Amino acid sequence: MTTSVSCPSCEKKVLWNQESPFKPFCCERCKIIDLGDWASEKHAISGEPAYLNEELENLEGEFF
């Protein structure tokens, strides 16, 4: 049995198999759109941040 999922970007049905190179996306365009949304912070993972801003500033001083 072949499973189908909805593309996270456009909701088009995508077959979930080895022949679907962009799964769970329907095409490279939708994959790149999603990557851009993460890069522009339209998407975020909920929860507490791993570091406080003060800790990040200290780390920046050590590595940059």
Image (cartoon, rainbow, N blue to C red):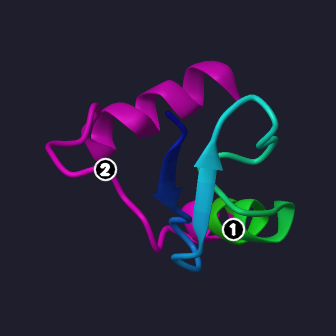
Q: Secondary structure at mark 2?
A: loop
Image quarter of residue 35: bottom right
Residue lying at the far front in this picture: please name it: 1
Q: Tell me, for residue 28, which label it has, or none.
A: none
The front one of 64 and 20 is 20
- For residue 1, above or below residue 39: above
| Residues rendered magenta in the picture | 36-64
Query: In this rendering, would 48 be left or right of 12?
Result: left
Query: In this rendering, would 52 be left or right of 32?
Result: left
Q: Reading the chain from its start, which is encountered first: label 2 or label 1?
A: 1
User: Which quadrant is the C terminus positioned in?
Assistant: top right
Image quarter of residue 55: top left
Residue lying at the far left in this picture: please name it: 48
Q: Tell me, for residue 45, which label it has, or none.
A: 2
Q: Amino acid at mark 1?
A: Gly
Whole-percent x and y of residue 57?
44, 39
Residue at the disc numbered 1: 36
Q: Amino acid at mark 2?
A: Ile
Image quarter of residue 20: top right
